[in-house]
Each structure stands twice: as C-alpha cells, then as structure tokens.
Image (cartoon, rainbow, N blue to C red):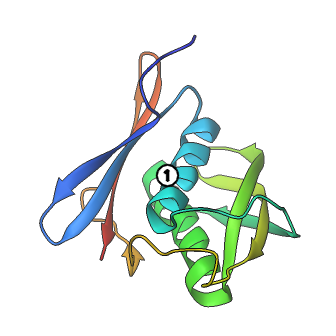
C-alpha cells in the first residue's frame, strides 16, 4: 500500500519535543523512528557507510523496546561520536530487535547539530497496532 503521508510528524510538547511515527510493519515503524531521530538531530547525515555496528536489544513490550532502540541511536551520536547512516533490521518481535547499523564518524565541521536531545523518555510513549500498520508517539527530553 502506497501512502503520500510523511512517515513522521513533530509533536508540540512543553519544553520537550516529540514525534509521531508510522510504519506498515513493526520493523518499518522502528526504522522510521530511527530515521526521524537522526533527521531531528543533524542537518545533514554522512552519505558514506564506514562501520558496521550490530545491535541486539530486548524490551518488556513494543513501547519499552522503542525507547531502548532510540536511546541506543542517541547514545551512538552523543557517547561514541558516530552517526547512523543506514539501518537493517534483521529480526524483530514485539520484545526483541536484532539490527545492523551502518555508521560514520561525527564531524562537527561537516555535521550541523539541529537539536540537542538529552534522552528518549517514557513520558507518553505509545506504540499501537492500527488497521493499516503501526503508529508510535515518543517524547524527547531537550
């Protein structure tokens, strides 16, 4: 099914920022959420994949898993100075995710930071299966 709507929108939230994300599958929802986070963080991402980072995470439910997933992507930038360039989710259930993240070094001379995000929060987190796929809402602490 093809849709012309964007895969995410920004949510207004006092002193914080949020996104609402859509995907046809749970894996696509998580890919879209990760892409939205990187687009909010940086003006321009590197185009070259330089390293492979394998990630396996577990959560209690899809909402917990989404917070942990986005937290890992934020950590790569903030803690490891690595920018996620591409994502391949290899296996996924509602409580586990195995992915390959292709990353490149963050270069402050090339990569303008648009938004300083401190953390991915559980505040108003929501992951919902809908008739045509999945929807999630996530709030970021700025």
Residue 5 vs 110, above or below: the answer is above
Image coordinates for residue 109, horizontal then vertical, percent: 62, 83
Residue corresponding to mark 1: 36
Image coordinates for residue 123, horizontal then vertical, percent: 26, 64
Most extreme residue toward the top is 1
- Front-lying residue, 10 or 26: 10
Quarter holding the N terminus? Answer: top right
Residue occupying the point 16% across, 60% down: 13
Residue 115 vs 19, above or below: the answer is below
- Front-lying residue, 11 or 68: 11
For this view, does 29 lie left or right of residue 86? left
Residue occupying the point 64% across, 40% down: 27
- Front-lying residue, 26 or 88: 88
Report the number of numbered marks.
1
Task: Specify whether residue 102 is in view.
Answer: yes
For this view, does 10 lie left or right of residue 109? left
Quarter holding the C terminus? Answer: bottom left
- Front-lying residue, 14 or 56: 14
What SS does tag 1 mark?
A: helix
| Disc 1 packing (10 Å; few <14; some 14–19; many ≥20) | some
Residue 14 vs 138, above or below: the answer is below
Residue occupying the point 34% across, 69% down: 121
Residue occupying the point 52% across, 74% down: 112
Most extreme residue toward the left is 14
Res 130 → quadrant: top left
Task: Specify whether residue 125 is in view.
Answer: no
Image coordinates for residue 28, horizontal then vertical, percent: 61, 37
Image coordinates for residue 51, horizontal then vertical, percent: 87, 71
Most extreme residue toward the front is 109
């Amino acid at each position: 099914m093809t849709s012309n709507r964007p895969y995410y929108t920004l949510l207004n939230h006092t002193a914080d920022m949020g996104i609402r994300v859509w995907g046809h599958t749970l894996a696509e929802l998580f890919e879209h959420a990760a892409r939205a986070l990187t687009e909010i963080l940086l003006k321009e991402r590197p185009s070259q994949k330089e390293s492979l980072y394998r990630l396996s995470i577990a959560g209690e439910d899809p909402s917990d898993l989404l917070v942990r997933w986005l937290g890992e992507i934020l950590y790569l930038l903030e803690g490891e100075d690595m920018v996620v360039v591409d994502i391949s989710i290899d296996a996924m259930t509602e409580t586990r995710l195995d992915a390959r993240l292709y990353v490149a070094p963050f270069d402050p001379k090339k990569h303008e930071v648009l938004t300083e995000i401190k953390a991915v929060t559980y505040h108003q987190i929501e992951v919902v299966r809908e008739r045509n796929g999945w929807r999630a809402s996530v709030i970021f602490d700025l």
